[in-house]
Image: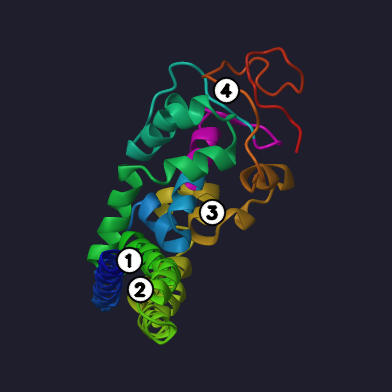
Amino acid sequence: MLPTAVILLALQVVLVLTALLMSRRVHGGRTPQRAPARERDLYEVALLGGGRGRVIEVALLRMNQHGRIGIAPTGCVAIPRGTPAADDIEKAILSTADGSAGRNRPPTVSTLRFWSKLDPAVTRVEDRLAAEGLVTRKGPIRTTKVTAWTALILSVVQVAVGMAAFSSEVAFAVLVGSLVLTVPVLVRAHLIRLRTRAGESELQRLRAADPWSVYQETALVGAVALHGIEAIGSPTLRGAMRHVRSKPEAGFWSRVDFGGAFSDGGGGGSSCSGSG
């Protein structure tokens, strides 16, 4: 029992130290910097306004407006074969559709939003804003949470081993030590917001200039980047873009032509049904 207890204790100490170091990195990286006032591209504004998910929403909406994809009122997405990608974000969406996530799930806004936001193309947008001190990188925050939770779970195991190898007093001391060290780290990680103070100021500046002249031809897309899908006037399209399913539909899908893609029945080549 003694070697097991010592190994668990050592692992727990490493996890706690890692959580503390990552927490310092997260908060150190949030030091506000003087961001240059410049016209930002659409995806930077989308990420600043609502995070990675909004970047994908904006890309899907623009692809839909330009006729490269079709978004049904049910939230189903039809992607014609050979659809070209106008930029790296659209390429990420099409890659999601071609990859295992696309083949194993129906083509819906929620599916594409969930999986495409993990693509390196979206990470690069986040990195550009983080380098200016406008947003907080999610990676260190996520690592902090996972490490701290693992340390807490391990402390429960350590209590059982400690009671067998040492005494209940030692096990209780280990548990208290873990709580004291990791709970504040978890609380700080969960309280961190996407935008820093500099990011809030930059977003206010952009909203004050709304609508941007550079996006006059896609005013709706620019409005969604700034304010989210609530800026969509059409209730049908707004409902489709808000599409969220509690569980994936069965079956798989591949790229389909628009013909029959929005049908509720079996024909047409799309496995995305209209059921909610």
Stretch of the chain drawn in magenta: 58-75
Q: Give the residue displayed 75% in from the left and 38% down from the top.
A: 276
Task: Tell me if residue 50 can be seen.
Answer: yes
Q: Earlier in the sequence, mark 1 or mark 2?
A: 1
Going from N to C along the chain, the mark reached first, 3 or 1, is 1
Label 4 vs 3, first from the N-terminus: 3
Q: Label 3 vs label 1: CA separation?
A: 59 Å
Where does label 1 land, which residue?
1
Distance from disc 1 to disc 2, alpha carbons, whole Å, reads: 5 Å
Marks 2/4: CA distance? 52 Å
Pointer 1 local density, CA inside 10 Å: few below 14, some 14–19, many at least 20: few
Circle number at residue 165: 2
Q: Earlier in the sequence, mark 2 or mark 4?
A: 2
For disc 3, the marked residue is: 224
Three-letter code, disc 2: Ala
Kindly indicate whether the residue at mark 2 contacts the one at mark 1 (C-beta within 8 angstroms).
yes
Q: Callout 2: 10 Å neighbours few (<14), some, many (20+)?
A: some
Q: Which residue matches tag 4? A: 252
Residue 255: percent from left, percent from top: 52, 19
In this view, the residue in front, 230 or 10, is 10
